[in-house]
Image: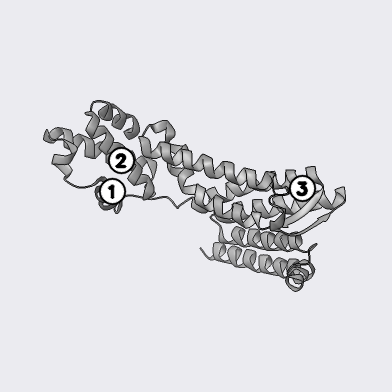
């Protein structure tokens, strides 16, 4: 089986600088369309060889912007599912750990408007992570460097918000807080991490039955997280008291339907 990645790199190394810049841009554009790696490098190899055989440069041969060329070519290429939400959930697990550490160190369980701000920063930094940090090794130019820098700025900002959530500056953003015992803190941290992990597996699993299980776990954990506070009392009480039983019924039904469909197939 031909290793098109290596073959493409050999061809790429012989291209003039302007053509290398164009093909770097094509590479990045294919990533934006979620083309699988094998298909991407095979297509890039075919395109580069065809251009070289014609004796023309990129501008003469393709006569179109790289984003347009990639958009047309990617229509017939296999694609993988966007990992945006699973990448966001991975970052969520990290920040959940950091949040848990601050709770443990300060001995205070807090709900603050800082937390939704951190969520917004996570959602904003994922594209920069995908097109910056993950692609730095490929050396695709200044755009990836800028994306990497923006990711680091947003990442550092989110870290600082959580670390200084209990500071005098950010204390006005607190919605509710209370001093808890060590046992309560550890239990709260357990549900923080369960919610974060459930969110990750919810987006990363391909099984709809498995996804239902993690949705149930996430909802129950979220209910337990807001239950100690005077926030959405009716909803949190319902989740804590009844939702796990409802969730178990949903999980059992989902597993039954899954096993039934598997048996029929």
Q: Distance between the residues labelled 3 and 1?
A: 46 Å
Q: Relative to 204, does residue 235 appear above or below in the rendering?
A: below
Q: In this view, does 146 lie above or below 76?
A: above
Tell me which label, 2 or 1, sits earlier in the chain: 2
Question: Looking at the image, is mark 3 or mark 1 nearer the viewer?
Answer: 3
Nearest to the eye among marks 2 and 3: give it.
3
Q: Distance between the residues labelled 2 and 3?
A: 44 Å
Which residue in the protein does label 2 denote? 25
Q: 55 or 123, which lies in front?
A: 123
Mark 2 Cα shell of 10 Å, populated few (<14), some (14-19), many (≥20)? some
- The answer to whether 133 appears left or right of 19 in the picture is right
Earlier in the chain: of badge 2 and badge 3, it is 2
Q: Is mark 3 on a helix, strand or loop?
A: helix
Name the spot of residue 216 as percent of width and height, x first.
67, 63
What color scheme is it? one colour
The crowding category of the residue bearing disc 1, from other C-alpha atoms within 10 Å (few below 14, some 14 to 19, many at least 20), is: some
Residue at which label 3 appears: 103
- Where is residue 31 drawn, in percent x and y? 38, 45
Q: How crowded is mark 3: few (under 14 residues within 10 Å), some or many (20 or more)?
A: many
Q: Which of marks 3 and 1 is nearer the N terminus?
A: 1
Can I make out residue 222 in this image?
A: yes
Nearer to me, 261 or 55 = 55
Question: Badges 2 and 1: C-beta atoms under 8 Å apart?
Answer: yes
**252 displayed left or right of 61:** right
Q: SS for tag 1?
A: helix
Residue 153 at what x, y percent from top left?
Answer: 53, 41
Q: Name the residue under label 1.
A: 67
Q: Is residue 205 visible?
A: no
Q: Give me the residue at 32% from left, 49% from top.
A: 77
Quadrant in which the N terminus is drawn: top left
Q: Is residue 223 above or below residue 6?
A: below
The residue shown at (69%, 45%) is 164
């Amino acid at each position: 089986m031909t290793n098109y990645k290596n073959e493409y790199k050999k061809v790429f190394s012989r291209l003039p600088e302007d053509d290398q810049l164009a093909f770097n841009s094509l590479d990045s554009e294919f990533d934006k369309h979620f083309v699988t790696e094998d298909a991407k490098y095979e297509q890039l190899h075919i395109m580069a060889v065809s251009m070289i055989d014609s004796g023309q440069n990129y501008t003469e041969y393709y006569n179109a912007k790289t984003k347009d060329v990639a958009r047309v070519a990617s229509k017939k290429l296999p694609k993988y599912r966007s990992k945006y939400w699973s990448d966001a959930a991975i970052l969520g697990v990290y920040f959940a750990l950091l949040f848990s550490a601050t709770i443990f160190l300060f001995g205070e369980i807090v709900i603050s408007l800082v937390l939704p701000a951190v969520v917004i920063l996570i959602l904003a930094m994922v594209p920069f992570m995908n097109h910056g940090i993950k692609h730095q090794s490929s050396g695709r130019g200044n755009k990836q460097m800028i994306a990497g820098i923006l990711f680091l700025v947003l990442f550092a900002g989110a870290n600082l918000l959580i670390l200084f959530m209990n500071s005098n500056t950010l204390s006005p953003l607190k919605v509710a807080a209370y001093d808890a015992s060590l046992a309560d803190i550890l239990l709260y941290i357990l549900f923080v991490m369960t919610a974060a992990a459930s969110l990750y597996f919810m987006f990363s699993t391909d099984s709809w039955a498995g996804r239902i299980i993690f949705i149930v776990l996430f909802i129950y954990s979220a209910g337990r997280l807001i239950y100690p506070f005077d926030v959405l009392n009716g909803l949190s009480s319902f989740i804590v008291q009844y939702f796990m039983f409802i969730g178990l019924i949903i999980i059992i039904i989902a597993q039954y339907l899954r096993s039934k469909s598997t048996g029929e197939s």
